[in-house]
Amino acid sequence: MSLAGSTTDTSISFKLKVWRQANAHAEGRFETYEMRDIPTDTSFLEMMDILNEQLIEQGQEPVTFDHDCREGICGMCSLYVNGHPHGPATGATTCQLYMRRFKDGDTITVEPWRSAAFPVIKDLMVNRNAFDQIQQAGGYVSFQTGGAQDANAIPISKEAADEAMDSATCIGCGACVAACKNGSAMLFLSAKVSQFALLPQGRAEAKRRVKAMLAKMDELGFGNCTNTGACAAECPKNIKLSNIARLNREFICAKCAD
């Protein structure tokens, strides 16, 4: 049985509408390219490589886009495909999207993240340094160094450990911001707060951490959360919306302790 939206053919041809923008200050526009006989087992980024090879052969400027591991780990492949961050596949990054998801004759639209906090650098590449600044504002975690502690020295429930690990799977790709109508970074921030707040090792700096990270998020121009849930729906790592509730509790407790 074939996947929904897939084709039984071994290759497809389609139109590719790509956002082209020379630099952060230039006016952008869509350019349309004809892609022919692309194998359906080609990944989306491999298809972009094929496009760039064609453009170079024609003496044109290749399309700039971010990529690194191409294994769904690094979060670099921040492309908006047909109205979805990372594309129509659920729980997957753009590099894990394959052309069998599309049909012969389709028009595929590719854009960069659209957020004031993620300015376009060139074409499909955006500056996501704002996420780094938020994490840096969170600071460090204090713990005793030296020999490895006994595994049972710090009792942690399996439920808390699992929740912390699930939160830590956030790859900081920015899909949540791209999906949010307000450009909010609350899902990303709540995941980073939760991965420490759920564990005793992260409690020492918990109050300072949550206040500093929220302040930095506001400073960098991210929007407010209105609980539409679009962020969690489009997250390639399925980060839970309940993390935002935990973040709010952590912040209220920190403010009440002042």
Image (cartoon, grey):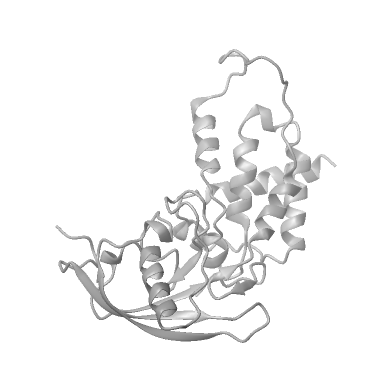
Q: Is residue 128 in view?
A: yes
Residue 45, given in percent of the width and then of the height, sits at: 40, 64
User: Which image quarter is the N terminus in?
Assistant: bottom left
| Relative side of 254 to 117, left or right | right
Residue 244, given in percent of the width and then of the height, sits at: 59, 50
The image quarter in which residue 207 lies: top right
Q: Is residue 82 in view?
A: no
Q: Nearer the viewer, residue 31 or 152?
A: 31
Q: Check the image and report above or below for 51 versus 26.
A: above
Residue 238, given in percent of the width and then of the height, sits at: 45, 50
| Relative side of 213 to 167, left or right | right
Q: Give the residue displayed 66% in from the left and 14% down from the top.
A: 147
Q: Give the residue displayed 38% in from the left and 83% down from the top.
A: 33
Q: Give the residue displayed 63% in from the left and 51% down from the top.
A: 189
Q: Give the residue displayed 59% in from the left and 12% down from the top.
A: 150
The image quarter in which residue 205 lies: top right
Q: Nearer the viewer, residue 233 or 99?
A: 99
Residue 157, given in percent of the width and then of the height, sits at: 53, 24
Total number of numbered discs in the rendering: 0
| Relative side of 30 to 27, left or right | left
